[in-house]
Image (cartoon, rainbow, N blue to C red):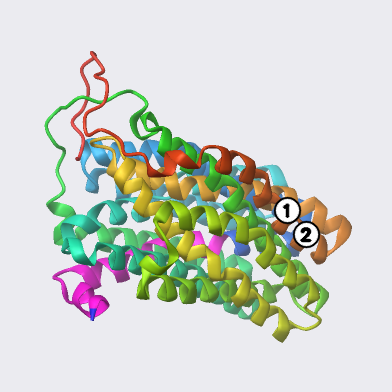
Amino acid sequence: MAYRRILATPHVLQLTIASVVARLPVGMTGIAFVIYVHERTGSFGAAGAVAGAGTIGLALTAPVLGRLVDRRGPRPVLVPAAAVAAASLVGMVLVGDAGGGTPALVALAALAGAGMPPIGGLLRHLWPDLVEEDLLINAYVVDSILIEAVFVSGPLLTGLLAATAGAGMAILVAAGLGLLGTVWFACLPPLGRVEPAPPHHRTRAGALASPTIRLLVFTGIPIGSTFGALDVTGPAFGAAHGSSALGGPVGASLALGSALGAVVYGSAPGRFGTPAQFTVRLALFQPLICLPLLLAPTAGVMLALGVLAGTFIAPTITARTQIGREAMPSGTGTEVFTWLSLSIMIGAGAGSALAGPIVQAGGWRAGVVLAAALPALGLPFLLARRGLLTAEMPAIVEADPRPHQAVVD
């Protein structure tokens, strides 16, 4: 079996587990911020602003960190970045518990996001060196499932901690796990073998020198906006049904559906067409699959519909990863995959920020409508430029005549 062969490859099992632990703050903090700030302010508007700030902070630095990993190797970048993120999360709880206002929480959330290391982008870049070519698509499916493991266990752990020890404790646990997992990941032998490559031709645009990568980045924003809107909608649904901590299980149900979608896609990817064709079909499908959430009368029904609504997520990520691998400019592997993830996270931050005041004014169902409407905004552009999804980037791009650092090819 393909997945058994992948996990039996030396160091792969440790890498995958360590990457999940290192990325848990990404799955925990969005919902933890919403619950924590809402508990202290009573406002979903302020909560959405803080959650959005965390994602915006990530957006401002993730490509830079990804490029630094390509140029200098992973170890000098990953651990210092994770330390900044952990310290900012601890500071956020200290300031919040001391009565600090929303602006201070927004600033610390942004700093925490800015320090999140590009674990996912680096792992995707490593897969071709870790497994045989015939296992690569399955390895990307495993990677998508790992992402969903983060977004299943993260919200569940957040919900449990918020209900028992308070949302502040959920943020502190996220800080500790992120730092621990990053140190573990960085210390594994495959990371020690990643070294900066000799200088070669490239442009200052880096990953964005490819028009295909630019298209994937732009169209990833509306995809992510659904996640951000639902991050706020879940706790709001919970508040309307007894406890905002119910937002954790709602988020986990979406991630569980995503993992199921990944398994179905990985079992026979050829039946869904080329990655380009599948990406377009999923973009058409995404707005429609969110709307049944409007019909949820109880928590149980909401969780079941959340599983259904999440089925598009991991297949979308896998198809976009396949396209990105073919289109990446030389020497930009970590940066490319960081951009692809980041575009979705930027959309999530925007979705959270928009959903906060909308949910505050119109209730959780208004958040569902927003989650369905936002991804439709990118459809015209994707359909008009879909030919780029099959384009390949030459291995050598226009030279930058200035001296530059070596990068990983």
Image quadrant in which you'd find residue 300: bottom right
The residue type indicated by label 1 comes to Ala
Residue 147 x/y as whole percent:
43, 65
Tell me: 334 left or right of 26. Answer: left
Dot 2 corresponds to which residue? 369
Q: Secondary structure at mark 2?
A: helix
Q: How far across and down, in percent of the image, does residue 194 sit?
A: 16, 48
Task: Kindly report the distance in space between the C-alpha atoms of the residues bearing marks 2 and 1.
Answer: 6 Å
Quarter of the rendering occupied by the N terminus: bottom left
Circle 1 Cα neighbour tier, 10 Å, few/some/many (<14 / 14–19 / ≥20)? some
- Say left or right for 11 vs 347: left
- Three-letter code, disc 2: Val
* Highlighted magenta segment, given as a residue range: 2-29
Q: What residue is at 14 percent from the left and 60 percent from the top?
A: 189
Can you identify the residue that label 1 sits on? 373
Identify the image quadrant of the C terminus: top left
Q: Residue at x 52, y 63 (%)?
A: 313
Of residues 15 and 289, which is closer to you in this image?
289
Asked if the residues shown at circle 2 and circle 1 are in contact, with their CB atoms under 8 angstroms apart, the answer is: yes
Viewer-side residue, 394 vs 199:
394
Among the 4 quarters of the image, the one containing residue 56? top right
